[in-house]
Amino acid sequence: MKQFVFGLGNPGDEYRQTRHNIGYQAIDALTTLLTGQDFSQAAREHHKTKTLLYRTGELFLAKSLTYMNESGQAVLSTVDYFDKQLVADIKSGKPAGTWEHPQLIVIYDDLDIPVGQWKLQFGKGPKVHNGLNSIRSHLGSDQFLHVRIGIDGRQGIRQQSGKDYVLTPFLGEEQQQMGDVLTEVCQTLRLRLQ
């Protein structure tokens, strides 16, 4: 059974350390945990699918090379390129695997969840997230495993719009909290990956 894990974010150095790119950071951490390799050294640019892709057996770890708002293009083209049947199943209304054995996992930032917290849910994500909305639109479904990593450190103070806030870096204590969260996320996902 093929399994695809996508970390959402924006390509480019200017976005590397932003809250919006926690999905990319999760892919880095997961690759190291599962394979002992550094994703940036092991992954290859896959032009046909618009991703940086690392494949080990039936497991595909990917970062889209599209910007966040076009994430669905990369997810659809990658899964379709390597597993047309899974895309057909998803488009016909079948879920992408199960809670215990997901075939499609998407990791992304969630502004509805505070820094230091995260949620693992099948078929449920935030209503407002442009990357996730793009995936829903391209696949015609949200029936996959969602890894929702909290990035809201504003503590109720909304001086900055969400759109701008997600492009800021984690500060001080938040960096340690996010490191702990990424460790928890990766340990949890390891149990669901072959």
Image: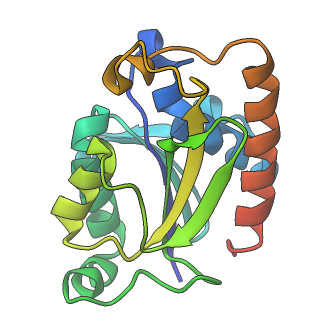
Which residue is painted at 53% across and 26% down in the image? 19
Task: Judge from the rendering whether residue 194 lies leftward or rightward of residue 131; answer left or right.
Answer: right
Query: Image height check: is 145 above or below 181?
Result: below
Task: Judge from the rendering whether residue 137 lies leftward or rightward of residue 193; answer left or right.
Answer: left
Which residue is painted at 43% across and 73% down in the image? 144
Which residue is painted at 56% across and 23% down in the image? 154
Query: Image height check: is 26 above or below 85?
Result: above
Which color mode does the image show?
A: rainbow
Total count of labels: 0
Task: Judge from the rendering whether residue 55 lies leftward or rightward of residue 174; answer left or right.
Answer: left
For the C terminus, give its image quadrant. Answer: bottom right
Residue 36 visible from this viewpoint:
no
Choose top left, top right, bottom left or bottom right for residue 127.
bottom left
Which residue is painted at 57% across and 34% down in the image? 151
Choose top left, top right, bottom left or bottom right for residue 82.
bottom left
Residue 14 visible from this viewpoint:
yes
Where residue 184 sits: x, y (%)? 80, 52
Query: Image height check: is 20 above or below 76?
Result: above
Closest to the observer, 141 or 89: 141
Closest to the observer, 3 or 163: 163
Query: Image height check: is 15 above or below 28?
Result: above
Task: Judge from the rendering whether residue 72 lies leftward or rightward of residue 56; answer left or right.
Answer: left
Where residue 38 sits: x, y (%)? 71, 34
Where residue 9 sits: x, y (%)? 42, 34
